[in-house]
C-alpha cells in the first residue's frame, strides 16, 4: 500500500493525516509554517528531509521510519493561499482544486475544505448530508441526495468570537477556548462568564436552528460535526437539547481526509 500525507490547511493551523493506501494511520495538527522553511521544502529528497515542524511531538515517529528514505506525496486542501504557496516548492505537492471534486452545483469560491468534507461525509454516511465545521470560522455545508451542493452559511467560530470581543472593546478580556471548562450559567454574574454565556448560548441556538431547518428539508439525513471546537459544541448542543442525542448527528474529525481519499479514488 502506497503511503501519502493529507494536509488540510485551515486558518488557525495545519491538519495532517498519514495514509497507507486508503487507511488513515495517524492524524495530528501543527502550527502554520514560517516562510523560512520554503528553501528546505524545495530541497527535500526523502521524508527524512522534511522539517521537524510538520511532525507532532505526540507522533510515534518510529512507525514512520520505514518511509524515511522516500519522498511522500502530499495532497493539500488549503483555504490559506500564503501557506499553500510555501508548498509549491516541494517536489511531490499536489494541491487539490475544486474543479475535480465530484459534487455538482458548486460555486467557484466555495472553500475546498468544505467541498471535501461534505464529499467525505456523503461517501461514508450517504447523501444528503450536512457538515458543521467548527474551525476558525464555523461553516454549514449541505449536499442533497444527488450529490448536489445545497449551500450553507459562514459565521465566526468560537475562538474568533471570543477574541474579537476582547480585541475591539476596552474592558473585555480575551477569553481562550481552553478556559471554557463547562457550560456557563446563562445569567452570568461576572464578565468572563457573561462573555462565555453570550457566545456559547447564541452559537448553540444558531446551530440548533440550522440543524432543525436541515432536517425539515432532509428528515433522515446524517449531520456531522468536525473542526477544533466541534466536539465541545456538539456536547453542549446535546446537553441543552437532549432530544438531539438519539438523532443522526455525530462528531468526526477526519471528514476532509475522507474527501481526499475519495477524490484520489476517482482518478484510479
Ligand atoms: N492547539 C490549538 N490551536 C488552535 N486552535 C485550537 C487548538 N486546540 C483547540 N483549538 C480550537 O480549534 C478551533 C480552530 O479549529 P480548527 O479546526 O483547528 O481550525 P482551522 O481548520 O480553521 O485551522 C479554535 O477555535 C480553538 O478553539
Ligand atoms: C469559510 C472558511 C474561511 C473556513 O475556513 P476555516 O475556518 O476552516 O479555516 C473557508 O472554507 C473559506 O475560505 N471558504 C471560502 C468561501 C466559501 O466557502 O464560500
Ligand atoms: K475547515
Image (cartoon, rainbow, N blue to C red):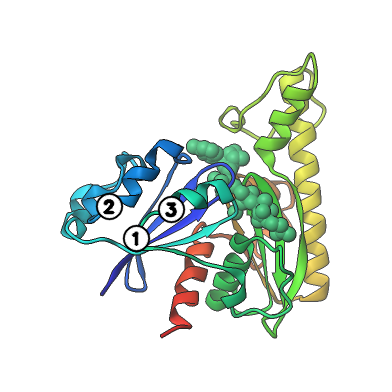
Query: Which callout, 3 or 2, points at the residue further toward the start of the chain?
Result: 2
Residue drawn at x 34%, y 49% is 41
Quarter occupied by residue 74: bottom left
Q: Which residue corresponds to mark 2?
A: 44
Does the rendering let one see residue 228?
no
Q: Which residue corresponds to mark 1?
A: 91
Determine the quadrant in which ligand 3 lies: bottom right
Mark 3 lies on a secondary structure that is helix
Does the rendering let one see residue 131?
yes
The quadrant of the picture occupied by the C terminus is: bottom left
Disc 3 versus disc 1: distance between alpha carbons? 9 Å
Q: Which of 239 and 121 is in front in this view?
A: 121
Q: Which residue corresponds to mark 3?
A: 87
Q: Residues within 10 Å of mark 1 (few under 14, many from 20)?
A: some
Residue drawn at x 78%, y 40% is 201
Disc 2 versus disc 1: distance between alpha carbons? 7 Å
Q: Mark 2 near mark 1, Cβ–Cβ under 8 Å?
A: yes
Quarter occupied by residue 185: top right
Amino acid at each position: 500500500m502506497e503511503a501519502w500525507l493529507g494536509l488540510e490547511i485551515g486558518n488557525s493551523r495545519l491538519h495532517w493525516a498519514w495514509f497507507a493506501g486508503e487507511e488513515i494511520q495517524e492524524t495530528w495538527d501543527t502550527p502554520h509554517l514560517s516562510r523560512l522553511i520554503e528553501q528546505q521544502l524545495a530541497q527535500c529528497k526523502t521524508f527524512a528531509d522534511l522539517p521537524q515542524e510538520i511532525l507532532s511531538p505526540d507522533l510515534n515517529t518510529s512507525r514512520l521510519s520505514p518511509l524515511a528514505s522516500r519522498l511522500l506525496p502530499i495532497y493539500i486542501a488549503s483555504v490559506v493561499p500564503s501557506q499553500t504557496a510555501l508548498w509549491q516548492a516541494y517536489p511531490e505537492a499536489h494541491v487539490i482544486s475544486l474543479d475535480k471534486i465530484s459534487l455538482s452545483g458548486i460555486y467557484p469560491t466555495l472553500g475546498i475544505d468544505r467541498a471535501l468534507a461534505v464529499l467525505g461525509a456523503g461517501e461514508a454516511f450517504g447523501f444528503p448530508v450536512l457538515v458543521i465545521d467548527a474551525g476558525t470560522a464555523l461553516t454549514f455545508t449541505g449536499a442533497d441526495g444527488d450529490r448536489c451542493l445545497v449551500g450553507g452559511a459562514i459565521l465566526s467560530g468560537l475562538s474568533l468570537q471570543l477574541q474579537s470581543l476582547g480585541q475591539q472593546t476596552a474592558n473585555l478580556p480575551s477569553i481562550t477556548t481552553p478556559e471554557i471548562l463547562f457550560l456557563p450559567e446563562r445569567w452570568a454574574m461576572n464578565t468572563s462568564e457573561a462573555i462565555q454565556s453570550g457566545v456559547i448560548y447564541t452559537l448553540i441556538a444558531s446551530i440548533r436552528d440550522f440543524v432543525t431547518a436541515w432536517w425539515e428539508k432532509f428528515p433522515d439525513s446524517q449531520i456531522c460535526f468536525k473542526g477544533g471546537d466541534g466536539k465541545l459544541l456538539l456536547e453542549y448542543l446535546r446537553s441543552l437539547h437532549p432530544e438531539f442525542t438519539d438523532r443522526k448527528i455525530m462528531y468526526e474529525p477526519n471528514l476532509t481526509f475522507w474527501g481526499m481519499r475519495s477524490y484520489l479514488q476517482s482518478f484510479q
